[in-house]
Image (tube, rainbow, N blue to C red):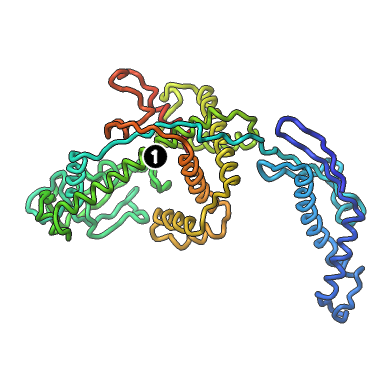
Amino acid sequence: MQVNETANEGLKRELQITIDASELEKKLTERLETLKGQVQIKGFRPGKVPVSHLRKIHGRNVMTEIIEQNVNEVTRNALDERGEKPAFQPEITLPEEQKEVEGILSGEADLVFNMKYEVMPEFEITDFSKVTLTKQIAEVDDEDVRKALEAFAEQNRQFEEKDGKAEMGDRVMIDFTGKIDGEPFENGSAKDTPLVLGDKAFIPGFEDQLVGVKAGDEVVVKVTFPEEYQAKDLAGKDAEFDVKVNKVEIARTPEVNEEMAKEMGFDDLATIEGIIREQLEKDFAKVSRTRMKRDLLDVMDEAYDFELPPTLVEREFEGIWNQLREDMEKAKKTFEDEDTTEEEARKDYMQISERRVRLGLVISAIGDEKKIEVSEEEMNAALSEHLRNFPGQEQQVYEYYKKNPQALASLRAPIFEEKVVDYILELVKTQDKKVSRDELFKDPDAGDEAEEPKKKPAKKKKAKAKAKDK
């Protein structure tokens, strides 16, 4: 095997590797000798098939396998000898003069191929014990608990049948059949379906047209499916629903008191208050930790400045940009609506892509150095949580992830990142800062709308921040 470096610029590398025909021919002969004792060919006793005959029948296929195995082996060896770690799977191509492969497959010509790749950049891990972050802390007060209790009561409202017309907030039990151009469409019909008017659980405009109906009424509801509707075959289309009202019910929200607590199976109201306070404290702590993570990523982004593998940045940018364009098309937005131009947006999102790749490389390096791993239990928990998004399709989705390592890696990545971030947060110094609940939950990219009511870039900033912090 001969390895010649043909390009070395920044992180980009290109090697030309030659595998002698004699080496390939030797391995082919060895493989055919092994195969001779395994195959059965009519007219020959087991183990007595001449190698020359096997070469005629199986030589091409066997040589193809040998070439593939050798290419994988020599590329790994070349990288090991050079002490280089590729940023992604190297690109293997044949030079122009090697495009005719018959000579290689017949064992008469050397195998020559080019190997293009980009190496992982080298950098030193920051001493995070010298980093100081501010930890925002908001205390759960009685007013927070009171509001949560009222919301809890609202969630546990009961419905009682009523005479008369339906009003906003009432629940109607309906049968319906949806039609487009007079023809029923798939999954557009249901029987005795509960619908709370005002909850906006159905297509926009559907619930409004049921205000004023009574039990026994039959009405036609006319709506237009949103352009971004999940069922693409229905998106943007006009539809009519034949609706029969079976029952009208009025909501009864229980009063927050000891009686409500006992009706819901608790010992007393104080027990519910304790559970709610504990959950709110967890929610506040989670938001506080998210703020610290964001600040940490900003510090890391400032601390590291090294050359990035261009292809990784390009791939990251393409993913972000394609999602942005898809979201804009669904919302029927233009760059002008976002107070920017496509050129400016490309520049902004390229910077975000560079940030994400840089931080991803740093987090990966820290995780590898400290041997931080994602356990099988953690992966199973993440997969189970993900399956909840596909009711009725859990088994198919489960099998898909189990058969696709790349899909599983997409579930592993955020868990790994959070574990590395947790590790770093244990190293940094923290300064506690007491803040109000509103300050803790305030969008850091929203700006002070009271001071700048006429400015509109907030939406653009928010979209960019969302992409940046992934």
Residue ID for mark 1: 289
Front-most of 15 and 223?
Answer: 15
Instruction: Please state the horizontal and vertical placement of residue 346, each as a whole percent of the image.
Output: 54, 27
Picture layout, residue 247 above or below residue 457: below
How many numbered discs? 1
Instruction: Please state the horizontal and vertical placement of residue 236, each as a whole percent of the image.
Output: 38, 41
Q: Amino acid at mark 1?
A: Arg
Q: Determine the residue positioned at 54% across, 38% down.
A: 319
* Relative to 356, 107 lies left or right: right
Picture layout, residue 209 above or below residue 60: above
Q: Determine the residue positioned at 37% across, 29% down.
A: 444
Q: Is residue 317 visible?
A: no
* Relative to 192, 3 lies left or right: right
Front-most of 268 and 159?
Answer: 268
Task: Identify the element where label 1 is drawn.
Answer: helix
Instruction: Please state the horizontal and vertical placement of residue 452, each as a whole percent of the image.
Output: 32, 18
